[in-house]
Image (tube, helix red, strand yellow):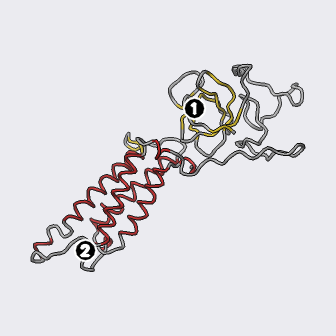
């Protein structure tokens, strides 16, 4: 899981879920009385349902590979739960007692702070869940990618570790840390036979993506082989028109078709 893949919309979902959890402990009715945890149907449908939807949305965003249940993505299930939670909150706030009003002789009992705050929280929760895929501002990374380190003084050793612009870049097409082949001169990298060499005017560089983006196979297939996550530096080893051939931390190569907004290291 990579929390740097979370977006601003996911941050709004998390905040609304926390607010909804707090509201569940407040009074359900305006005349002090029980809270939502004293009403199993209300707490499970409105409060726990909304919080569970938020968890599924965030989990779907943080997982490296999409996970589906009954043919539906976890994020889609989460959005459905948030809408259901809002629906329950709306009608529960309008008619807090429901059928019990007649049994109490038509008692004038209104929605308490727990229901009102819960309605606000579910409204924000459902709105953020639905709007995040549609509004570019909500798709920006919640945690910005770290900026590249300042250039090292002459003679200083750059910090080690794959995935950082200051680190020594591995040769395109060869996994980081691979050993030279027998009979190969020391210090010379041997690219695989099928690897294509970058254009003469192209120099490999480090980059980070603003939001999670798929990496497709070099053979042109439509199935993604990996997902590039914000907050991690990747090595661009070749340019093909507007697309880039990128190399992941484990040495896999693929084509990044959407290069808009990338941050160069």
Would you name the residue on which mark 1 appears? 259
Front-most of 150 and 83?
Answer: 150
Residue drawn at 66 percent across, 37 percent down = 264
Residue at (33%, 61%) from the top-left corner? 120
**Considering the numbered disc 1 on the image, is that residue within a helix, a strand or a loop?**
loop
Task: Say how many tags the image has.
Answer: 2
For the residue pair 168 and 132, the one nearer the viewer reads as 132
In the picture, measured across the screen, residue 62 lies left or right of residue 181, that is: left
Tell me, yes or no, whether the two marked residues, 2 and 1, touch with CB atoms within 8 Å: no
- Name which residue lies at 55% across and 33% down: 260
Mark in front: 2 vs 1: 1
Q: Residue 11, how many percent across, how many down?
A: 48, 54
Q: Specify the label residue 29 is tagged with.
A: 2
- Image coordinates for residue 23, horizontal then vertical, percent: 36, 69
Q: Quadrant of the C terminus?
A: top right
Q: How crowded is mark 2: few (under 14 residues within 10 Å), some or many (20 or more)?
A: many
Does 77 appear above or below 123?
above
Task: Give the mark nearer the N terminus: 2 vs 1.
Answer: 2
Image quarter for residue 103? bottom left
Using the rendered view, name the quadrant where residue 220 is placed: top right
Spot occupied by residue 229 in the image (x, y as percentages of width and height) = 58, 42
Q: Nearer the viewer, residue 16 or 222?
A: 16
Q: Say which element carries label 2.
A: loop
Residue at 36% in and 51% down: 127
Please, is residue 12 above or below residue 38 in the view?
A: above
Q: Which disc is residue 166 wearing?
A: none
Q: Given the current orientation, which residue lies at the most extreme bottom position?
A: 32
In space, the residues marked 2 and 1 are separated at their CA atoms by: 53 Å
Q: Where is residue 251 in the image (x, y as percent from the top left)?
A: 69, 34
Horizontal side, residue 257 vs residue 137: left or right: right
Could you classify mark 1 by the number of other residues whose Cα lies within 10 Å: few (under 14), some (14-19), or many (20 or more)?
Answer: some
Q: Looking at the image, is 79 positioned above or below residue 223?
A: below
């Amino acid at each position: 899981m990579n929390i740097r893949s979370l977006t601003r919309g996911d941050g709004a979902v998390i905040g609304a879920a926390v607010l909804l959890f707090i509201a569940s402990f407040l009074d359900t009715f305006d005349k002090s009385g029980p809270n939502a945890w004293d009403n199993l149907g209300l707490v499970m449908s409105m409060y726990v349902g909304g919080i569970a939807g938020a968890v599924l949305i965030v989990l779907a965003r943080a997982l490296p590979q999409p996970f589906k249940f009954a043919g539906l993505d976890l994020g889609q299930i989460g959005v459905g739960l948030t809408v259901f939670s809002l629906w329950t909150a709306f009608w529960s706030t309008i008619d807090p007692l429901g059928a019990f009003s007649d049994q109490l002789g038509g008692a004038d009992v209104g929605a308490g702070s727990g229901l009102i705050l819960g309605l606000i929280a579910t409204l924000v929760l459902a709105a953020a869940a639905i709007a995040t895929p549609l509004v570019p501002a909500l798709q920006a990374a919640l945690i910005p990618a770290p900026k590249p380190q300042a250039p090292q003084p002459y003679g200083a050793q750059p910090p080690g570790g794959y995935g950082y612009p200051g680190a020594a870049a591995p040769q395109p097409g060869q996994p980081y840390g691979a050993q030279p082949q027998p009979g190969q001169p020391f210090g010379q990298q041997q690219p695989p036979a099928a690897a294509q060499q970058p254009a003469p005017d192209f120099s490999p560089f480090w980059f980070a993506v603003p939001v999670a983006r798929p990496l497709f196979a070099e053979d042109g297939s439509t199935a993604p082989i990996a997902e590039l996550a914000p907050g991690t530096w990747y090595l661009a080893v070749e340019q093909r028109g507007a697309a880039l051939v990128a190399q992941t931390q484990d040495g896999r190569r693929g084509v990044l078709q959407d290069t808009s907004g990338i941050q160069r290291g």
